Image: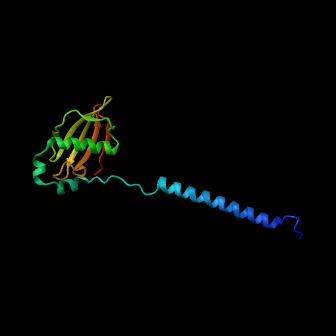
């Protein structure tokens, strides 16, 4: 072969290598996107009712030392769950006692909706988010926005 004419076999080989690099790059990008979309997602760990009954101290189940802190923490948890909007506020700082030991109901609202947040007291430090476990969040019309699965 003379040096004036191009080597078409070498050119064809270079194109095939380039094409395989591009296709391989797209395959890797699609695999990464699929992993980030459908891969391991961290979920909030909420203790079930049996854990609440076993771990709640006796003095917490009977009464609260700082009742307004329960609703403040419950509203914070509801906002962190994404159920209550960021503009939500407590309508009453004190929780209402329910017929079940350790479960309280806090009332919150935004400009457009009212919410009832039922919580279980898991441990004595109610200022910590993990010590106030959300059981149920409902709107004033009765629609349930969140219900913990036991």
At horizontal 52% and vertical 55% (from top left) the residue drawn is 34
Residue at far bottom of view: 1
Q: Position of residue 112 (x, y in %)?
A: 33, 29
Is 31 positioned to the left or the right of 130 in the image? right
Closer to the camera, 139 or 44?
44
Is 140 left, or right, of 68 in this rendering?
right
The front one of 150 and 5 is: 5
Asked which quadrant contains residue 68, the reply is: top left
Q: Position of residue 22 (x, y in %)?
A: 65, 58
Residue 54 horizontal side relative to residue 10, left or right: left
Q: How many marks?
A: 0
Q: Quadrant of the N terminus?
A: bottom right
Location of residue 88 by image quarter = top left
Any part of residue 33 in sight:
yes
Look at the picture and state if 136 lies above or below 130. above
Identify the residue at horizontal 11%, vertical 46% (top origin): 65
Q: Residue pushed farthest front?
A: 3
- Residue 70: percent from the left, percent from the top? 19, 44
Query: Is any part of residue 98 visible from this angle?
Result: no
């Amino acid at each position: 072969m003379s040096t004036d004419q191009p080597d078409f076999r070498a050119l064809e080989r270079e194109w095939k290598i380039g094409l395989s690099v591009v296709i391989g790059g797209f395959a890797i990008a699609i695999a990464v996107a699929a992993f980030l979309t459908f891969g391991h997602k961290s979920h909030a760990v909420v203790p079930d009712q049996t854990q609440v009954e076993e771990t709640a101290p006796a003095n917490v189940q009977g009464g609260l030392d700082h009742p307004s802190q329960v609703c403040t923490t419950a509203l914070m948890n509801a906002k962190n769950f994404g159920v209550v909007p960021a503009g939500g506020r407590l309508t009453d700082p004190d929780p209402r006692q329910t017929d079940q030991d350790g479960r309280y109901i806090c009332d919150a609202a935004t400009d457009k909706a009212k919410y009832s947040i039922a919580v279980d007291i898991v441990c004595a430090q109610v200022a910590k988010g993990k010590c106030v476990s959300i059981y149920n969040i409902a709107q004033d019309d009765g629609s349930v926005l969140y219900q913990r699965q036991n």
